[in-house]
Image: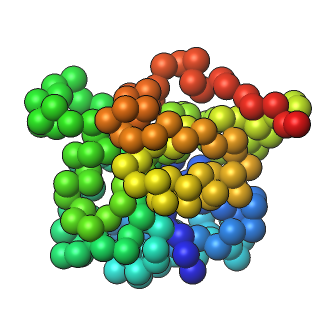
Amino acid sequence: MKYSVIGSGSVGTALATQFAEHGIEVAVTNTRGPESLVALANGLGPAVRPVTLKEALEVSIIIFAMPFASHEAVARARADWSGKTVIDAMNYREMNFEPLGGLQSSDFVANALPGAKVVKTFNQLPAALLTRAPKEGRGRRVMFVAGNHEDANAEVASLVSALGFAPIVLGRVDQGGRLLQYRGPLVLQNLIMLDE
């Protein structure tokens, strides 16, 4: 298995739903353990497998879909994140930005994951839209991708496309990634790329 989702709230469930709809295997976990995810997995089908956190961290592409503050505890579960691509689907919702030390939230997350390549995506849509089929009329709903490693951006953009969205790579987090903070402006939630 290549993918895992950490978090089973509205965003984690929406992502698991998209994996299931597209027949892409994914491991899912949360703080309550795999037993708490059996009903979700049974409802979504065989592509979704409940696992422990340790198992979820063994795959190569890990999606953080939990509350922002929870990432630090997950980060401590591995001493070395080398070889891992972490998709940051979280949003920093606090009014006080001082804890970020002037960084974009994804760069702050990356500092806690030594060796990981962190890519921001799946955070711009509310869960209700993220759960829906990405196909809209003659096009697909746009999903922006930003990260500091071109190879990881390309790999994640490929996943975004496999899940039915239209990926647009914005470049580095401190550049194009600024567009994705706080779920992005409302207009970003309604962009459709027309199929050719």
Question: Is residue 124 shown above or below 35?
Answer: above
Q: Is residue 31 above or below residue 162?
A: below
Image label count: 0
Q: Position of residue 57 (x, y in %)?
A: 38, 75
- 161 on left or right of 100: right
Q: Position of residue 99 (x, y in %)?
A: 12, 36
- Left/right placement of residue 56 relative to residue 13 reads left
Indicate how the structure is coloured in the image.
rainbow
Q: Quadrant of the C terminus?
A: top right
Residue at (87% x, 30% y) in the render: 137
Q: Position of residue 143 (x, y in %)?
A: 60, 39
Identify the residue shown where x is 26% and y is 54%. Answer: 110
Q: Which residue is at a point 75% across and 31% down the rendered structure image?
A: 193
Q: Nearer the viewer, residue 154 or 181?
A: 154
Quadrant location of residue 176?
top left
Q: Name the residue: 46% across, 54% down.
A: 150
On the question of residue 127 being in view, the answer is: no
- Which quadrant, please, contains the N terminus? bottom right
User: In this view of the protein, can residue 47 be seen by the observer?
Assistant: yes
**Residue 73 quadrant:** bottom left
User: Where's residue 6, x and y in %?
Assistant: 42, 62
In the shown orientation, is residue 89 left or right of residue 156? left
Q: Is residue 159 above or below residue 141?
A: below
